């Protein structure tokens, strides 16, 4: 009876592991997996001593650059260990002379070393199946990595280009000022469709390849989260405050942006109001901060709408759609300090939202 139970438990472990592999490496959509969550959380735990807020940010960033790659490596080792454990039990259940011998047969099969053999047909079939699983796991991960790094490279190209337009760290106000000074505000209409497409790619890639969320930019002062926040704030300020012809592409960019950030937040089970309304739902930007930005833009000669109160309500009405998820993702990814995004997340000392 014990042999039957152990063999059945082995089958369950193998099936569960293969289901986890399928969700992570094969299903082209958001598919949360408990095993993956446990591995990433466990790896994060070991990183905590080196990522305390008392340490300089550059030092924490260097350490966290290894978090996502090591988590993926740990995930592969976890899958292999579970398969090894499951087949060890099944070999023992089918008549291996000892647990040590069962472990030897399982390891030889999984790693395709071939130094162990079996006389029984049932054990031989187990060896073949375990060897096939081991090869498939390695092959799938090898195919998975180029796809992920291609998406990472495409994401970071846009983040790098934003520094030219919005400074470092990226700032919505800096972006508007530079366009006003160099290109002319009418050229902003060329920006929004590009970033609308970028947000659509983020939604797809960062939910189907969730490890990408934690892959850090090559430079410590860059982050895909703060870049997203700067662009969304720039579009919201443009729509709400600038006295220029209304451009619907800015509105579409904001909508694409907050939908993308919400989808990523959904994957990590963050809660937010899907239908927020200001002022019932507050935002992390204060009226005094908005007024300071309004005055700064006016001082630079940027054409602004005369009704400042309505401009504030319009801006807050846009910001409320992405404010909570933007701050949550900035905290999750330990994003570098940037105005109106990571500077008010938990990692930098959270500021209470105000109406």
Image (cartoon, helix red, strand yellow):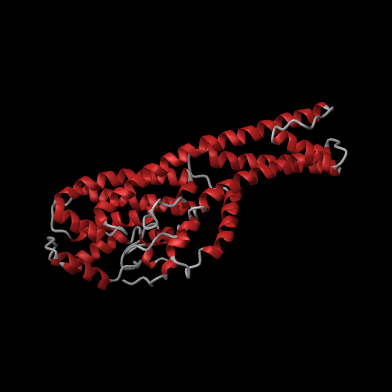
Labels in figure, total: 0
Extreme-right residue of the structure: 97
The image position of residue 240, as x and y in percent, is 21, 60
Identify the residue shown where x is 74% and y is 38%: 107
Which quarter of the picture shows residue 272? bottom left
Above or below for 119 versus 279 = above
- Nearer to me, 229 or 245: 229
The image position of residue 165, as x and y in percent, is 24, 52
Q: Position of 143 compared to 8: left or right?
A: left
Q: Is residue 256 visible?
A: no
The image position of residue 61, as x and y in percent, is 45, 58
Identify the residue shown where x is 26% and y is 52%: 164
The image position of residue 174, as x and y in percent, is 23, 59
- Nearer to me, 21 or 12: 21
Quadrant that contains the C terminus? bottom left
Quadrant that contains the N terminus? top right
Which quarter of the picture shows residue 301? bottom left
Identify the residue shown where x is 18% and y is 61%: 241
Q: Position of 233 compared to 336: left or right?
A: left
Q: Position of 195 compared to 91: left or right?
A: left
Identify the residue shown where x is 57% and y is 38%: 22
Q: Is residue 110 visible?
A: yes
């Amino acid at each position: 009876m014990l042999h039957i139970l152990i063999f059945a438990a082995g089958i369950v472990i193998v099936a569960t592991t293969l289901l986890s592999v399928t969700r992570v490496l094969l299903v082209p959509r958001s598919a949360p997996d408990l095993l993956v969550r446990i591995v990433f959380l466990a790896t994060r735990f070991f990183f905590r001593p080196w990522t305390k807020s008392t340490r300089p940010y550059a030092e924490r960033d260097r350490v966290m650059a290894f978090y996502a790659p090591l988590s993926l490596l740990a995930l592969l080792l976890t899958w292999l260990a579970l398969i090894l454990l499951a087949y060890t039990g099944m070999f023992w259940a089918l008549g291996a002379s000892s647990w040590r011998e069962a472990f030897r047969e399982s390891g030889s099969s999984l790693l395709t070393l071939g130094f162990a053999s079996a006389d029984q047909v049932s054990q031989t079939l187990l060896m073949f199946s375990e060897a096939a699983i081991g090869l498939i796991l390695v092959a799938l991960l090898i195919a998975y990595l180029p796809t992920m790094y291609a998406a990472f490279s495409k994401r970071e190209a846009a983040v790098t280009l934003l520094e030219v337009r919005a400074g470092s760290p990226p700032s919505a106000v800096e972006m508007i000022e530079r366009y006003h000074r160099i290109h002319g505000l009418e050229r902003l209409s060329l920006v929004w469709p590009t970033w609308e497409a970028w947000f659509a790619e983020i939604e797809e890639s960062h939910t189907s390849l969730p490890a990408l969320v934690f892959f850090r930019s090559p430079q410590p002062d860059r982050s895909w989260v703060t870049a997203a926040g700067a662009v969304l704030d720039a579009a919201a300020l443009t729509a709400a405050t600038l006295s220029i012809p209304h451009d619907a592409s800015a509105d579409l960019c904001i909508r694409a942006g907050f939908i993308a950030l919400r989808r990523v937040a959904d994957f990590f089970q963050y809660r937010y109001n899907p239908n927020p309304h200001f002022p019932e739902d507050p935002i992390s930007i204060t009226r005094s901060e908005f007024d300071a930005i309004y005055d700064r833009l006016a001082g630079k000669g940027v054409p602004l709408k005369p009704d400042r109160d309505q401009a504030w309500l319009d801006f807050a009405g846009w910001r409320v759609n992405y404010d909570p998820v933007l701050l949550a993702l900035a905290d999750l990814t330990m994003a570098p300090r940037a105005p109106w995004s990571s500077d008010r997340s938990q990692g930098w000392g959270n500021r209470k939202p105000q109406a």
